[in-house]
Amino acid sequence: MGGHREIEVSIVDAFTDRPLAGNAAGVVPDADGLSEEAMAAIAAELNASETAFLLSSEAADRRIRYFTPTTEIELCGHATVASHAWLLETGAIEPGSHSVETDVGVLDVDIDDGGVVWLSGEVATVDPVDLDYARVADALGADPATLHDVGAELPIAVASAGLAFLVVPVNFLEALGSLDPDFGAIQSLVDEVDATGLYAFSFDTLGADSTLHGRAFAPGAGIPEDPVTGTASAAVGAYLREQCAFDGELPEEMRFEQGQFVDRPGHVRVRARSDPVSVGGVATTALEGTMAVPEFDSDEIIEA
């Protein structure tokens, strides 16, 4: 039998202050020397929506690579928040300004004295797309009228502040909660518009202090429904700004609630008056331990 390496791993719940809520992220704080195959296997074993692997960097304070249970992605907001909250909790870093190297570039991370982690993305883009409402509604398992009702004022669009999402406004929370998504059809839509996932939202909310309620679907990345999504929230913040969604100026800070329909409630703070859009939240460690990681022979890996 070959040898193995013992590595430290944690599950950190982001965009919530209580364990077993929000969005769970795997955090591997000492990933230097791990092969890509090992990272993929660790992420599959942890089975969080994303796992963050923290690496040394010459361009920033640290580098992070992000893996879902099935693939590597360029950026993950909640895993970045979770990682920096874990580093703060363990005393590895202090509140203040930090930087992280990702596959979309070097991004700024700021941690305030209350432990809120703020991630600033890239310059945002927002592009309305010409998709048939009936087709989008069918993919979501929704009545087309629930999209038409708001579509005249807020079009379906692709928005990005680091990762692209197909943004779909829905009229009421009841309609949002009763979605019955066809994940294959959703993936066809997002592939067609070159997006990572689909984010449906309504201004009808559960919390009186919330700006909107969202649901995010990214089946192609191995995440049928993502509980609370930082990168999508940043994209939607930019979308609301570009579409002049509010009378007068965009609120200085917005609160996006998400996750209640998958029993993982959380919320994302969003600042989008100007670029870069910033998303913020707290996180809490739910699980800590070690994992035995064998050496991987790439010849043993079979591509699907």
Image (cartoon, rainbow, N blue to C red):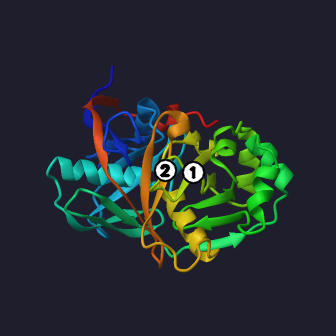
- The three-letter amino acid code for the residue at tag 1 is Gly
Q: Disc 2 vs disc 1: Cβ atoms closer than 8 Å?
A: yes
Q: Quadrant of residue 77?
A: bottom left
Question: Where's residue 202, x and y in %?
Answer: 62, 54
Q: Earlier in the sequence, mark 2 or mark 1?
A: 1
Q: Quadrant of the N terminus?
A: top left
Question: Where's residue 225, x and y in %?
Answer: 58, 40
Q: Residues within 10 Å of mark 2 (few under 14, many from 20)?
A: many
Who is closer to the viewer here, 168 or 4?
168
Q: Foreground residue, 141 or 125?
A: 141
Disc assigned to residue 35: none
Q: Kindly tell me whether residue 257 is visible in this rendering.
A: yes
In the image shown, does 231 or 31 lie closer to the viewer?
231
Q: Residue at horizontal 27%, vertical 33%?
A: 5
Q: Secondary structure at mark 2?
A: strand
Up the image or down, 23 lies above or below 171; here it is above
| Direction from residue 246 to residue 80 in the image, left or right | left
Q: Quadrant of the C terminus?
A: top right
Residue 225 shown left or right of residue 186 in the figure: left
Residue pictured at 32% horizontal, 25% vertical: 2
Amino acid beneath label 2: Glu
Residue 229 visible, this angle:
no
228 over 56 or under it: above or below: above
Q: CA distance from mark 2 to mark 1?
A: 6 Å
Image point (62%, 66%), residue name? 159
- Above or below, 212 against 155 in this view is above
Residue 88 lies, in percent from the top left, at 20, 53
Point out which mark residue 257 bears. 2
Element marked by disc 1: strand
Residue at which label 1 appears: 214
